[in-house]
Image (cartoon, rainbow, N blue to C red):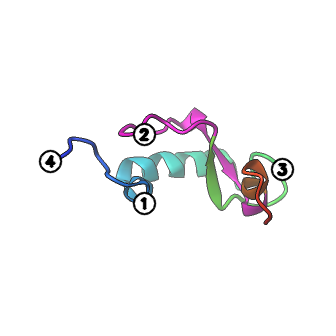
Amino acid sequence: MASNRPYQTYAEYLRHPEFLRIRTAVMLRSGGKCEVCGKRPPTEVHHRQYPPWGTFDTEDNLLAVCHQCHCEKHGKVN
């Protein structure tokens, strides 16, 4: 059964041009500093809340973060 959703998997979502556009805008917004610690350059984006499946984030739902802060946000060891 074909789906009318723009992506089928989370990996496809992360590669989708719309997500990449939003991610780029968030990284530019950060001015080259992690939006959590302000010390390191951001390398990833963190979802404040995951969007409903089949939709996309908004810029205000994402934070540009360094790897260390992203791990801390998720309770993981760096």
Instruction: Give the residues in magenta.
Output: 48-68
Q: CA distance from mark 2 to mark 4?
A: 22 Å
Local packing at callout 2 (Cα closer than 10 Å; few below 14, some 14-19, many 20+) is: some
Q: Distance between the Cα atoms at labels 4 and 1?
A: 20 Å
Residue positioned 28% across, 46% down in the render: 6
Q: Which residue is mark 3?
A: 37
Residue most extreme to the bottom: 78
Helix, strand or loop under label 3: loop
Q: Is residue 56 magenta?
A: yes
Nearest to the observer: residue 12 or residue 24: 12
Looking at the rendering, in which quadrant would you find the C terminus? bottom right
Vertical position of residue 15 compared to residue 18: above or below: below
Report how far apart the C-alphas of labels 3 and 2 lie in the structure: 26 Å
Q: Amino acid at mark 1?
A: Ala
Q: Is residue 33 visible?
A: no
Dot in front, 4 or 3 = 4
Residue pointed to by mark 4: 1
Three-letter code for the amino acid on which mark 4 is drawn: Met
Cα distance in 3D space between marks 1 and 2: 13 Å
Instruction: Give the residue pinned by disc 2.
Output: 56
In the image, which disc is placed on residue 11?
A: 1
First in residue order: circle 3 vs circle 2: 3
The structure residue drawn at horizontal position 53% and vertical position 46%, both measured from the top left corner, is 25
Q: Secondary structure at mark 4?
A: loop
Q: Position of residue 75 (x, y in %)?
A: 77, 52
Residue at far front of view: 1
Q: Which residue is rendered at x = 45% and y = 56% of the image? A: 14
Q: Are marks 4 and 1 in contact (CB under 8 Å)?
A: no
Give whichever of discs 4 and 1 has the lower sequence position: 4
